[in-house]
Image (cartoon, rainbow, N blue to C red):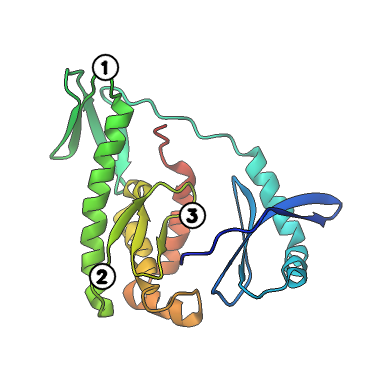
Amino acid sequence: MPSVNTPEPARSILIDGQTVAYQLRRSQRRTIGLSIDHRGLRVAAPTRARIGDIENLIRQHGQWVLDKLANWRQRPAPETLQISNGSSIPLLGAELPITVTPLGRARWQFAGERLHLWPSDSVSANQLLEKALREKAREIFAERLGHYAPQLGVGTPPLRLSSARTRWGSCSHHGGISLNWRLVFMPLPVVDYVVCHELAHLKEMNHSPRFWSVVEQLCPDWKARRLELRKLAHQLPQLQ
């Protein structure tokens, strides 16, 4: 999940008679990677990779591309969760009950294993919940970075919270780490996998075998945790 350069203008390619648009991003990586999400086909390629080589690889995986795009088109849009008194949400994989009490001044408070929300006329319960969860996420992520960074012999990097739709984390070339605040819904072992993944980029700014060996040093069962992340990603609450 290293930082990438500005994407190139959208391109398209013909696969089995179907025109497929794709977004190309170039960066200091060694291989060409394909990914598909709600935005469509996205291609990450080395800076000097030729378009012909890129599109040959897309065609080699043509059926996979068409199947994944069809799957995304058929997937129902996630419903927005409406928070009310007695609602509950996952927090680090456990259920967090929520108490909602209207009040003149908007605020929130974590008390034991419960979250209290006091919305106002101008701030909804959903808005308060996101603010509370972002604060909790920053606290947890900072603690996990501080736990794992010394194991790599590096200082705890600066942390920024992200709201990306499909990207769980990134590491800049300046050593800063961004983590998606929605990870706070996930079990802690999954959060730790993403933290370890991004910290490993401080040693290897790529996805080479050396990079994955660094990840494994911090998180020996990273493959299982990555699989769980992918499964849970489609089940997270949507607050807005």
Residue 148 in the image, given as x and y percentages of width and height = 26, 70
Q: Is residue 30 visible?
A: yes
Of badges 2 and 3, nearer the viewer stands 2
Q: Which label is found at residue 148? A: 2
The answer to which of marks 3 and 1 sits earlier in the sequence is 1
Circle 2 sits in a helix, a strand or a loop, which is it? helix
Task: Give the residue at x 60% y 46%.
Answer: 39
Q: Is residue 227 left or right of residue 196?
A: right
> Disc 2 and disc 3: Cα gap in Å?
22 Å
Task: Give the residue at x 80% y 50%.
Answer: 19
**Quadrant in the picture for residue 15:** bottom right
Circle 3 sits in a helix, a strand or a loop, which is it? helix
Which amino acid, mark 3?
A: Arg
Check contact, mark 2 vs mark 3: CB within 8 A: no
Of badges 1 and 2, nearer the viewer stands 1
Farthest-out residue, left: 111
Residue 104 in the image, given as x and y percentages of width and height = 17, 17
**Quadrant in the picture for residue 146:** bottom left
Q: Which label is found at residue 230? A: 3
**Quadrant in the picture for residue 135:** top left
Q: Is residue 87 visible?
A: no
